[in-house]
Image (tube, rainbow, N blue to C red):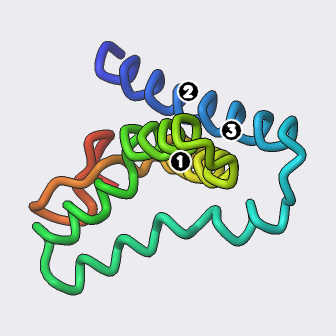
Amino acid sequence: MKILVPKLLLHAEGFAVCVAAVVAYHAGGFPWWKFAVGFLAPDLAMIGYAFGPRIGAATYNAAHTYVAVGLLWLAGHFLAIPALWPLGLIWAGHIGFDRLVGYGLKYPSDFKDTHLSRV
């Protein structure tokens, strides 16, 4: 049971981030068609796997960390570019959803080796 608790917490954390991003997106009054179109965009980073697992893991992880989302939000805030705010929410929602369903950051050994488990 001890092993399952951190994993369950990581899934719950993903759920919380996904829900928070959707609620904030709704509260901002942003168009839902953009959310639908942009929600899967971070998965385009899987194209890196065409160049091998090391590059694939690096590109996938770069597009699936909250650090990148935070930097986008900070850029939008401090550079006064409000158009970046909904993009950050969509991106955060995507990452949260991935964590909820068990997709984590990738190890360079194999696409199925993630920080959450082997998919």
Q: CA distance from mark 3 to mark 1?
A: 16 Å
Q: CA distance from mark 3 to mark 2?
A: 14 Å
Among numbered discs 3 and 2, the one appearing first in the sequence: 2
Among numbered discs 1 and 2, the one appearing first in the sequence: 2
Q: Which part of the image, by quadrant, shows the C terminus?
A: bottom left
Q: Which mark is residue 101?
A: 1
What residue occupies the far bottom of the structure in this picture?
A: 50
Q: Nearer the viewer, residue 53 or 81?
A: 81
Q: Residue 97 appears at what percent x and percent y?
A: 58, 47
Residue at the image position 32 percent from the left and 40 percent from the top: 116
Q: Please state which amino acid type lies under the numbered disc 1.
A: Val
Name the front one of labels 3 and 1: 3
Residue at the image position 17 percent from the left and 65 percent from the top: 110
Q: Residues within 10 Å of mark 3 (few under 14, many from 20)?
A: many
Position above or below: 15 against 114 = above
Residue at the image position 64 percent from the left and 52 percent from the top: 90
- Disc 3: which residue: 21
- SS assignment at label 3: helix
Q: Residue 94 appears at what percent x and percent y?
A: 57, 52
Q: Which mark is residue 49?
A: none
Total marks shown come to: 3
- SS assignment at label 1: helix
Q: Please state which amino acid type lies under the numbered disc 3.
A: Ala
Position above or below: 41 against 27 = below
Q: Which mark is residue 12?
A: 2
Left or right of residue 95: residue 110? left
Q: Which part of the image, by quadrant, shows the N terminus?
A: top left
Residue at the image position 46 percent from the left and 37 percent from the top: 70
